[in-house]
Amino acid sequence: MLRNVHPQDVSIEPFKTYKRFQFNNVDSGSGVYGLSGVSGSYHNFSTGSAVSQSFGVYNSLSASLGLEPYSLGTYYSLPLYYTINNLYYERFSNNPKLPQSTNKIQPFLSLGGGINPNKQYRNLHGACSIISVPQELFGEEIKPKSIKVTDNSTSVTFTIKDDGDGNLYDNAYSSSFAAFKSSSWDNSKWTAQGSGSVVGNVFYKTGMLVFTDTGSYNNVALGTGTDGFEIDYRSTHTIYQHEYTVISTAGQFNTTRNISATYQRSGSVTVVEGAEPRYYFPPGDNPNGGPNSTGSFNSSYEATQFVENFVTHSQFAPYMTTIGLYNDNNELLVVGRTSKPIKNDPTMDMSFVLRFDV
């Protein structure tokens, strides 16, 4: 018994879910790295002499074949710096690092430039450090205002957080940062010579944390061992809640095709000759002997014309236990089951709501 679901009875609503992750500098297998970027001349750049960082296990065989010797890769500080600058900073500020740039602020040309420039302070100096989080560990984006980086690269432990607008600041100087931000980045509002007001930026949709302060925070994310870092954040994933209202109007769905309603369980479905599979139906010559019975099956099957006496009672009505949703190709996609059988009242409309998340 089928009927179409009206489009007005379908609701699909998105909602965001978040999962917490924690990594530190020794979790290199996770793909969360602390990297260093340094500016300089890229004329005659040579990988053999360039400053780099390698992650993973060294493989001497790969090295002998001239292949990447580390299983997880090598990162070079010079090209990494210019990559970060070109993606996030070059066209955002009036302090260009590349010769073809102009002095005109063009934040819309930078990756992550959709963030309001009035609420984000970007200023890249001659070096930076980076924490890179792979996409499979942040989903659609890192949840704004969920980041906490604990860094032990100096004698002082830094606790760095994000403000939800893409700025990273030292939590110990949160009041200084708040004053700096609320004054539209007026340096005179800094306290303690600007310590911690803005130590870098986070680009939520690409999983990049860039620490641009070259003072007290120049080694953030670059320490090892007990001088390393830990990052705590939440990933984002959108789930869609589907809701379908299935209506059984009065007088509909008041019959049953259940074989238990037919006389002596003789069946209520006609199967034409040649239909498969025939093994759903009784043998034609009534073999006996239990599971070891022998005999052939009917080539066709005729529905009975008789039902049990209780079906003819005036109060008889089927009970709803299962509702299926099919696509246009009559493929069953969703099965919903009621917590208990519900009698289908023939005198009133009945609505059933199927709700599931995808």
Image: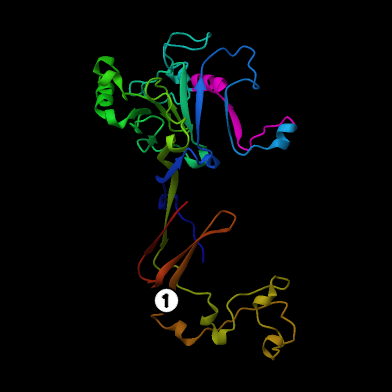
Examine the rendering and report whether any part of residue 169 can be seen. yes
- Image-based side of 355 in relation to 196, left or right: right
Q: Quadrant of residue 151?
A: top left
Q: Compare residues 223 and 303 and report the one nearer the observer.
A: 223
Whole-percent x and y of residue 35? 51, 29
Let me know if residue 78 is in the magenta part: yes
Q: Quadrant of residue 171?
A: top left
Let me know if residue 76 is in the magenta part: yes
Examine the rendering and report whether any part of residue 184 can be seen. no
Q: Compare residues 301 and 152 and report the one nearer the observer.
A: 152
Whole-percent x and y of residue 284? 71, 84
Q: How is the image coloured?
A: rainbow
In the figure, 210 relative to 239: above or below?
A: above
Q: Compare residues 245 and 316 and report the one nearer the observer.
A: 245
Q: Tell me which residue sits at (73%, 29%) in the image.
A: 66
In the figure, 185 relative to 102: above or below?
A: below
In the figure, 249 relative to 145: above or below?
A: below
Amino acid type, residue under disc 1 in the picture: Ala
Q: Tell me which residue sits at (45%, 41%) in the image.
A: 23
- Secondary element under disc 1, as helix, strand or loop, is loop
Whole-percent x and y of residue 159? 34, 34
The residue range painted magenta reads: 65-87
**Residue at which label 1 appears:** 317
Crowd class of label 1 (few under 14; some 14 to 19; many from 20; radius 10 Å): some
Whole-percent x and y of residue 245? 41, 57
Q: Tell me which residue sits at (51%, 22%) in the image.
A: 37
